[in-house]
Amino acid sequence: MSIKFLTIILAALILGIVVELIRRERLTFKYAAGWLFVSVVALTFVVFDHVLFRIAHFFGFELASNFIFFTLFGVFVFLSLLMTVFLCQQSNRNDAMAKKIAMLEFEIESVKKKNDNNKK
């Protein structure tokens, strides 16, 4: 089996899994966009490998594999940063929700005490 065929299968498999996860609503598009982009670019470069070699040469890489590793490293660092931003936003939302719930519970307890005092 050639490496080109294996790469096409792997990229298509990743694309299919991500699309299926989106379809089943287990993954939102916001989080899947990076994976979709990477798999489509991988499929494109496998089919049109001469474009990959030209881009690698343009950026000064002797071997296309070095360019691929460098690019993947950059993509994963970017995705990691993006996930960190999303995690911080979610943490802030959780803190705000906890504060609102605490205020609502306090108000409910105040109303209950007021009701109990009015009954007496």
Image: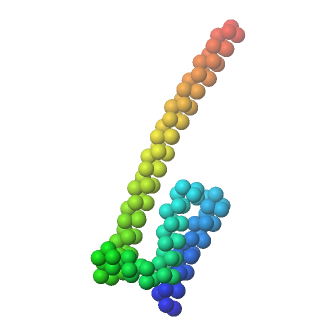
For the question of whether residue 15 can be seen, the reply is yes
Question: In the displayed structure, would residue 14 be above or below residue 85?
Answer: below
**Above or below 22: residue 39:** below
Residue drawn at 66 percent across, 61 percent down: 24
Q: Position of residue 65 (x, y in %)?
A: 36, 80
User: Given the current orientation, which residue lies at the most extreme right position?
Assistant: 119
Q: Determine the residue positioned at 33% across, 82% down.
A: 63
Task: Answer above or below: position of 87 versus 14.
Answer: above
Q: Nearer the viewer, residue 88 or 70?
A: 70
Dividing the picture into quarters, in which one does residue 107 lie? top right
Exactly how many numbered labels are in the figure? 0
Quarter assignment of residue 18: bottom right
Q: Specify the farthest residue to the bottom.
A: 1
From this viewpoint, is residue 66 visible? no
Q: Which colour scheme is used?
A: rainbow
User: In percent of the image, x 53 and y 71: which residue is there?
Assistant: 40
Left or right for 91, reference 110: left
Q: Where is residue 23 in the image (x, y as percent from the top left)?
A: 65, 62
Q: In this view, does 120 lie above or below 103?
A: above
Residue 118 percent across, percent down from the top left: 68, 9
Q: Residue 103: percent from the left, percent from the top?
A: 54, 26
**Residue found 32% across the figure and 74% down from its top:** 59
Quadrant of image for the C terminus = top right
